[in-house]
Image (tube, rainbow, N blue to C red):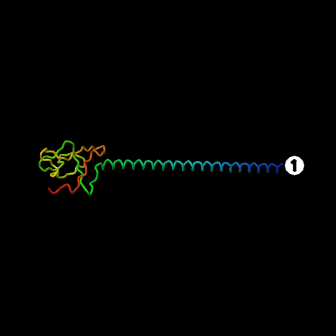
């Protein structure tokens, strides 16, 4: 009987040990699961950072595109307070009579209408101002005329 009791106690101890091992295994599995979750969180954070970087890059590209569009849109120099810029097509000229330049049929980009009566050379029937061609897709100093000071230009004639 004592032997049976001892055997039962031993069996109970073995079961307890097995239960303890199972508990340790579950704890280890839980720890592994937490570690995997941590790795997944880190990967998600890295992906979020990459998406943020991509978004910033996209915004920078959009900003550069807007800047390029602004440069193309405002390709004519602005009016200065001290003077006036003239723009016209190559080959157009102002005759001996006072004439608006350019006329209504002109396709000149951003054409500035102005009277140039004072600057007409009546003998040559050409204006001494050299009008430059203004292309739509490029910007250069050759394509804009020199500044005419307001003191030199009589807009009331």
**At 26% across and 57% down in the image, what residue appears?**
82
**At 71% across and 50% down in the image, what residue appears?**
24
Question: Count the marks: how many?
Answer: 1
Q: How many C-alpha atoms fall within 10 Å of the one at disc 1: few (<14), some, or many (≥20)? A: few
Quarter of the image where the C terminus is located: bottom left
**At 19% across and 52% down in the image, what residue appears?**
114
143 vs 11, left or right, is left
**At 20% across and 55% down in the image, what residue appears?**
152
Residue 72 image offset from top left, x and y in percent: 32, 47
Task: Specify the farthest residue to the right.
Answer: 2
SS at circle 1: helix
53 vs 80, left or right, is right
Residue 44 image offset from top left, x and y in percent: 54, 49
Residue 130 figure quarter: top left
Residue 92 figure quarter: top left
Residue position marked by numbered label 1 in the rendering: 3
Task: Specify the farthest residue to the top.
Answer: 91
The front one of 35 and 157 is 157
The front one of 76 and 143 is 143
The front one of 102 and 122 is 122
Residue 21 image offset from top left, x and y in percent: 73, 49
């Amino acid at each position: 009987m004592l032997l049976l009791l001892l055997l039962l106690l031993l069996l109970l101890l073995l079961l307890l040990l097995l239960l303890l091992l199972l508990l340790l295994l579950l704890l280890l599995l839980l720890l592994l699961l937490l570690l995997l979750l941590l790795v997944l969180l880190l990967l998600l954070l890295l992906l979020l950072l990459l998406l943020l970087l991509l978004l910033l890059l996209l915004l920078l590209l959009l900003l550069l595109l807007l800047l390029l569009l602004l440069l193309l849109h405002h390709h004519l120099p602005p009016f200065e307070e001290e003077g006036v810029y003239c723009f016209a097509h190559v080959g157009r000229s102002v005759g001996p009579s006072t004439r608006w330049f350019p006329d209504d049929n002109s396709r000149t980009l951003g054409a500035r209408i102005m009277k140039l009566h004072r600057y007409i050379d009546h003998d040559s029937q050409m204006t001494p101002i050299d009008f430059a061609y203004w292309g739509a897709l490029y910007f250069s100093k050759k394509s804009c005329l020199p500044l005419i000071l307001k003191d030199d230009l009589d807009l009331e004639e």
